[in-house]
Image (cartoon, rainbow, N blue to C red):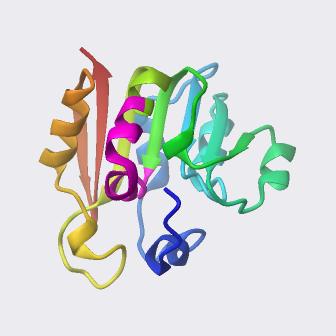
Amino acid sequence: MTDNSSHVRKWHGRRPFSIDDEAIVDFLGITKGMSILDIGGADGYYSKRFATRGAAVTIIDAYDYDFKGLNGVGIKTILRDFCIFDGGNYDLVFMAHVYHDLVHSCKKKALENLSRVSSKCIANLDFTKDNFGFGPPISERLTKEEVVQDMRSIGFILERSMDLPFHYLQVFVRE
């Protein structure tokens, strides 16, 4: 995900939309002791919430948004592009507004990496293809069905999903 395009850099750390973040964490079933990899976790927006539930959280991002501060609150950080990531094994691999970028920059490698690092679940929170005036270009967004097909190709099936304003959240488990 070496893409430095304006839409990738523009939205990190800013949220022009409202999501019930606690409902997302509840829906994901975050529990004490879970190991979580937050791909493209940026400033740790969701990772901080996961950590307060007792999860062992690691962020991987191609950009350092305040990794020193995140390390200070117990969140491990990896400064690396997920397209070239080569390590780890996590109960949950979480992606918020990043999977569509991975698909457009390194789909095959991203899927291989997702399959390798996720021992149980993959969760994807992303924008719908509706035009509501913010977020990535509509042409770069993925439908829920496209994500289901991609995850199925690496042995994960849709366990549950949630529709949100402007977004969808999907949780996949190993077949």
Q: Is residue 102 left or right of residue 79?
A: left
- Quarter holding residue 140: bottom left
Q: Does any portion of residue 109 appear in the rendered image?
A: yes
Residue drawn at the location 44% of the way across and 37% of the way down: 26
Looking at this view, is 3 or 164 the one in front? 3
- In depth, the one of 169 and 146 nearer the eye is 146
User: How far across and down, in percent of the image, does residue 98 sit?
Assistant: 43, 55
Magenta segment includes 27: no
Q: Is residue 101 magenta?
A: yes
Please give the range of residues in magenta: 96-112
Residue 17 image point, x, y percent:
41, 73
Residue 123's image quarter?
top left
User: In the image, what residue occupies the spot 49% across and 25% down?
Assistant: 117
Q: Vertical placement of 147 versus 64: above or below?
A: above
Farthest-out residue, left: 145
What predominant SS class does the magenta segment belong to? helix
Task: Please state the total of marks drawn on the protein image.
Answer: 0
Q: Is residue 143 above or below residue 14?
A: above
Report the front residue among 159 and 175: 175
Horizontal relation, residue 12 to residue 76: left or right: left
Instruction: Report the quarter where the C terminus lies.
Output: top left
At 22% across and 57% down in the image, what residue appears?
A: 142
Among the 4 quarters of the image, the one containing residue 174: top left
Q: Residue at 49% of width from left, 48% of height from top?
A: 22
In the image, is 41 to the left or to the right of 17? right
Using the rendered image of the protein, determine whether residue 158 is visible from the camera's viewpoint: no
